[in-house]
Each structure stands twice: as structure tokens, then as C-alpha cells.
Image: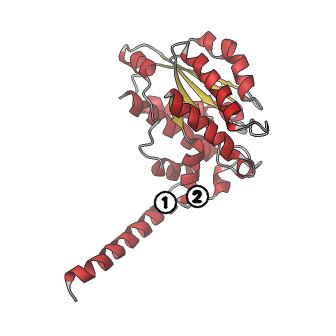
Amino acid sequence: MKLSARFPKILACCAALAVSSAASEARDLSPAETCIAVNDGLSLGAPLPHTAEALKAHRPLRIVAIGSSSTVGLWMVRKEKTYPGVMYRELLRLDPAMQIEIVNSGRNGDTIPGNIARFQRDVFAHRPDLVIWQIGGNDFTWGEGIESLGHRIAEGVAMLRAQDADVILMDQQYTPVILATHYAKMQAAIASVAREQQVAYLPRFDMLHKTVEAGVSIVSLSAFDGLHMSGDAYDCTGRVLARAIMAAVR
């Protein structure tokens, strides 16, 4: 047999071995570590100029995380286990000289209009360099079209940017209860605003979905209620976000 005829078979064999090896390695990792591995190099899709300026000037970086229960860190006993808490620890690991102030302005059960109504007291009052706005988990029952949802999100983003703050939009979690809803409508609205307003975007839904595709059970990424994230999912979200922030400013 000629080498040219055998070459495709050799390539196919090598590819199969590589996939098998990757799957084996994934099985050896914890759910959080697998999540981090499959999302290595994730980009926020937009620069963070105010964040970069604060770090360059060696002044405290002020971050406000606003949203609902995913920001509060529902079912996490210690604040260090919430995604803002994990993010804080990971940022310091990446740059021990960094000065960081993080305010967790999450509220269980909150919605996009509820978040916006709290901006003045729970966001602007802290004069942040960076705002991470986690949205979507409690808004898919509105029955509104994408245009209406997008308008509300765009309104909120414009208000945040008017305060000279960088913005990162974070979408929904990938859990059984969310999957049973019309989640795609909310996903499309958030992604559309991020693209049109040219703000940073953490695609949490896709991030966790990729982890499940890598062999991690969705149960391992979900709390007992099937709606909120597990400790592993909070851990991955905080660490991946911290790494993406540092990549954006460098």
C-alpha cells in the first residue's frame, strides 16, 4: 500500500488517540478543574479600559458585582465560595500586588428592572471601575419579545457606562431548571446587547455547557434544587472570569 493511501488512516488513528487521552484526563479532574480546562483562554470580547487604568496607576481596583442569587451565591455558606469571592482570590493569585475592593450587590430573586432600580444605591455609590452584571435567571417568564428584553438590558448598560465604569454582562447558568425554560430568548437578548454596545460578555451558559460536553454531569454543576449552581460551578465561574479580566487588561 502506498504511503499516501495509508496517511489518512494514520491521521484518523492519531486523532482518536488524542480524543481518548483528553477524555481520560478530563475524568481525572474535578468538575471545577474540567470546567476551567475546557474554557482556557476564554475571551470577554471587549477591552476593559477603566480596569486597565486602575491597575496601571497602582490604585485599588473597585469592582461591583450586581445580579440575583447567582451573585449572592445562594447555598454557599461562606462568601469566599461565591463567584465574587472566588474571583477575588484568583485575581490576587494572578497578581499578588493588586489592590482590590469587591462589593457583592446581589439580591435573591431580583430581575433586570429590579437591578436597574438599585443601581444608584448599590452600584454608583461605590464608584466602581468595573461592574459585573449577572442577569437573566429570573426574567424569562416576562413573556416579552427579544426586542423588549434587549431594550431593558441596553438601558442598564448605558447607565453603567455613563458612570465611567467597564461593564461585563454575565448570562444564565446551565442547569436543568433553566434548560426547561425559554432560555434561548434571554441568551439572544444578552448576547445581542453585548455585541451592539461593545461591552465585555461572560457566556456562563455556554461555558458550563462545554463542561458537560467534556463529560461532567450537569448534576455536578447544579445545586440540589436543579436551578442554582453547585460549588464547583461557582468556583469555575469565578476563576475563569478572573483570568479573562486579566487577559483583557494585558
Numbered circles on residues, count: 2
Give the image location of residue 51, x and y in percent. Answer: 45, 21
Work out whether 91 lies above or below 55: below
Which quadrant is the N terminus positioned in? bottom left
Q: Secondary structure at mark 1?
A: helix
Q: Are marks 2 and 1 in contact (CB under 8 Å)?
A: yes
Q: Position of residue 45 (x, y in %)?
A: 45, 35
Q: Residue at x 56, y 47 (%)?
A: 206
Residue at the spot 74% in from the left edge and 46% down from the top edge: 227
Asked which quadrant contains residue 229, the reply is top right
Q: Residues within 10 Å of mark 2 (few under 14, many from 20)?
A: many
Nearer the observer, 7 or 51: 7
Q: What is the three-letter code of the residue carrying label 2?
A: Val
The answer to whether residue 229 is seen in the rendering is: no
Q: CA distance from mark 2 to mark 1?
A: 8 Å
Quadrant of the image occupied by residue 140 = top right
Specify whether 140 is left or right of 250.
right
> Where does residue 235 sit, x and y in percent of width and height?
57, 41
Residue 84 can be seen in this image? yes
Residue position for label 1? 26
What crowding class fits label 1: few (fewer than 14 Cα within 10 Å), some (14-19), or many (20 or more)? many
Residue under label 2: 216
- Horizontal and vertical percent for residue 200? 50, 31
Disc 2, SS? loop
Q: Residue at x 52, y 59 (%)?
A: 214
| Lateral position of residue 131 relative to residue 180, left or right | left
Asked if 155 appears above or below 148 in the picture, the reply is above
The residue that appears at 40% across and 26% down in the rendered structure is 96
Left or right, residue 167 beside residue 95: right
